[in-house]
Image: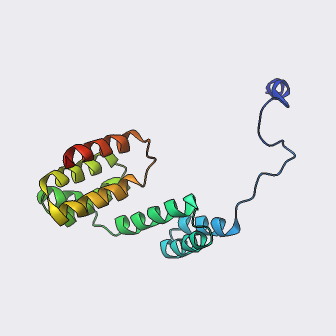
Amino acid sequence: MDSLVSATAGKLKGPRSSERVAEVDPAVAQARKELEAGDFVAARKSYEAILDANPGSVEAKAAIRQIDFLTRATARRPDAVWVADAAPNDIEAALAAADVQVLNQDVSAAFERLIALVRRTSGDERTRVRTRLVELFELFDPADPEVVAGRRNLANALY
């Protein structure tokens, strides 16, 4: 290991060991701490304050989306998937089930559930389901293969 360090010394980019890495903004650190502790109300308020001070904060925008999702999803019934499966045209049940599925990391199934409902609905109902699906997409990296497939399938369902 020492020979590897010696061989690459001064040749790699990045901060030198003697250089200080930029410190995290105390407001961001506090918001992260609140989120990690599960205090969604306090974390959301902290991230909103960060966003007020810096409207371009990508982290604050993403964190608020995550907090809103977690607040909603953790309040859902644990049997939401079963309830939605028993009533496939119940929009509220489908939205609840999709939240639970994403929370349980069954992302593709959540996307498929809502895309199928987009195909079966129209008007305001369709808009409501599509809007929630897009909100779920925004929780993930746009390049995530499940999101790419979901967006493509949504486009096919709409047209």
| Residue drawn at x 35%, y 54% as measured from the top left | 102
Quadrant into which the N terminus falls: top right
Answer with left or right where residue 7 lies relative to residue 87: right
Relative to 118, does residue 25 appear above or below in the rendering?
below
x and y percent of residue 16 in the render?
A: 84, 41
| Residue drawn at x 59%, y 68% as measured from the top left | 31
Q: Quadrant location of residue 133?
A: bottom left
Is residue 79 visible to us here? no
Colouring chosen for the image of the structure:
rainbow
Answer with left or right where residue 145 lies relative to residue 152: right
Answer with left or right where residue 136 lies relative to residue 50: left
Q: Quadrant location of residue 132?
A: bottom left
In front here: 52 or 84? 52
Answer with left or right where residue 149 lies relative to residue 124: right
Relative to 49, does residue 1 appear above or below in the rendering?
above
| Residue drawn at x 36%, y 68% as measured from the top left | 72
x and y percent of residue 140 in the render?
A: 43, 50
x and y percent of residue 122 in the render?
A: 14, 59
Q: Quadrant location of residue 22?
A: bottom right
Residue placed farthest to the right in the image?
Answer: 18
| Residue drawn at x 12%, y 59% as measured from the top left | 89
x and y percent of residue 157 in the render?
A: 20, 47
Residue placed farthest to the front in the image?
Answer: 159
